[in-house]
Structures are given as structure tokens and as C-alpha cells.
Amino acid sequence: MELLRVCAFPACRLGYEGIGISPDCNPENRATPRELFNWALGPAEDYILDKLCEDGYSDAVVWAKQNPVDEIVQDDQPYIGNNAVS
């Protein structure tokens, strides 16, 4: 099993490694790291929170297109249903 790590901040700019989904996936028209840290420490307005959610969804979509599920999911275990191996 492979662990997918997610970061709300631009991982490359902060020197984080091994992050799968972050603002680095889709860097166009993004908030600066300073803005993200400020919003993490204090409440942001609703329209900003909506935009952050949309951006996070977009980052996940970009990651999913680059990592097709049939290439990353491997199940070597036999299917077990009703306590019997099929």
C-alpha cells in the first residue's frame, strides 16, 4: 500500500518531500504561502474558504490525472466473499 500525503501549503517552496497533493499540482492564480499561513492562523471570509476548497479539489483532480488508479492500486490478495476464496 502506498501512502498519499497531502499538504495545504506549496510543498516544494517549503522544502517538503514526498507530498502527492498540494498547491504545487496546480500553481496558477494561487494564494501566496504567507496568505495561506495567515488564513490557517485566523478565520478567513467565506468566499476565501470557498476558493480554497475549489483549489484543493482542482489539485486533487490534477494529481488523479497524473496517477491513474489502475496504475497505482495493486491488489495481490484473492477476493474473499462469504469466508470462501473465489
Image (cartoon, grey):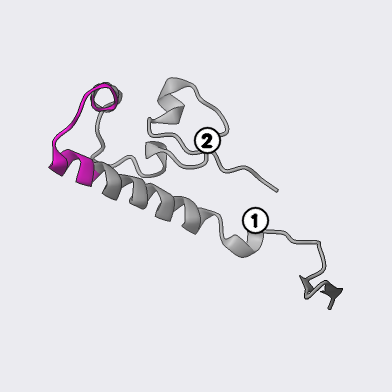
Q: Which residue is found at the position 63% from the left and 64% from the top?
A: 70
In front here: 36 or 63?
A: 36
Which residues fall within the magenta stretch?
Answer: 39-51
Q: Residue at x 24, y 27 (%)?
A: 39
Residue 65, image x, y percentages:
48, 58
Q: Which mark is residue 72?
A: 1
Give the percent coordinates (x, y) of residue 56: 35, 45
Left or right: residue 77 versus residue 8 is: right
SS under mark 2: loop
Amino acid type for the residue under numbered disc 1: Ile
Image mark for residue 19: 2
> Where is the C terminus found, in terms of image quarters?
bottom right
63 to 68, vertically: above or below: above
Q: Residue 24: percent from the left, percent from the top?
A: 40, 37
Q: Residue furthest front?
A: 82
C-alpha distance separating marks 1 and 2: 15 Å
